[in-house]
Amino acid sequence: MHTVIVYESMYGNTREIAEAIADGIHRADPSAAVDCLPVAEADAELTRSADLLVVGGPTHMHGMSSGVSRRMAASAEAKREGHEEAAREAHEAAEGQGLRTWFRHLPDTEHGTYAAAFDTRGTGAGSGGAAPGIAHRLEHHHYDVVAEPEGFVVEGLDGPLRAGELDRARAWGAALL
């Protein structure tokens, strides 16, 4: 079983969730091959080799991030004192390719290739989620989505993750197998 986990992350929260999902898959099947990488490093050849493609990103403005929302987040982070590392990470993510662009270049696959979608999101009732849009795009490329889109909660605007979310991500990853 080869799993590829592709994520977009502005502040490191979505990266942490992706790594926890990878850990959960390894715990469930120690022989599983798992590649966990940022969207900028996820090329078509690697995604085509996956038996299971797991894709996740942050929630911006109730859905998937866009170039504009990533630049807005990076700009806001740059203005906060004492957050230099987070501002650097956010700026790099804002300048790079996001999931929306990546999906435009994702090749279609044959039915029988499995996928799952996740996001990180705020705590408010109206905060929305990116995972449903991610799942929809996976289905558009003929992936069979094997789990309901999952959201993992971030406290505040840029984290940290809510207590217990990494354990929940590990359990979700294990359940995907």
Image (cartoon, rainbow, N blue to C red):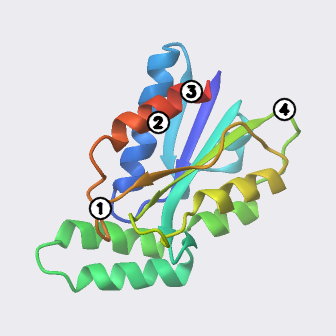
Name the residue beneath numbered marker 3. Answer: 175
Mark 3: amino acid: Ala
Are the residues tagged 1 and 4 within 8 Å (C-beta)?
Answer: no
x, y (%) of residue 111? 88, 38
Helix, strand or loop at disc 3?
helix
- At horizontal 27% and vertical 45% (from top left) the residue drawn is 163
Mark 2: amino acid: Ile
Q: Residues within 10 Å of mark 2 (few under 14, many from 20)?
A: many
Q: CA distance from mark 4 to mark 3?
A: 18 Å
- As drawn, the label of residue 130 is none
Q: Where, quadrant-wise, is the C terminus in this rendering?
A: top right
Mark 1: amino acid: Glu
Are the residues tagged 4 and 3 within 8 Å (C-beta)?
Answer: no
- As drawn, the label of residue 112 is 4
Q: CA distance from mark 4 to mark 2?
A: 21 Å
x, y (%) of residue 133? 67, 62
Name the residue beneath numbered marker 1. Answer: 155
Q: CA distance from mark 3 to mark 1?
A: 25 Å
Mark 4: amino acid: Gly
First reached walking from the N terminus: tag 1 or tag 2? 2
> Does residue 104 appear to the left or right of 85 in the view shown?
right
Q: Where, quadrant-wise, is the N terminus in this rendering?
A: top right
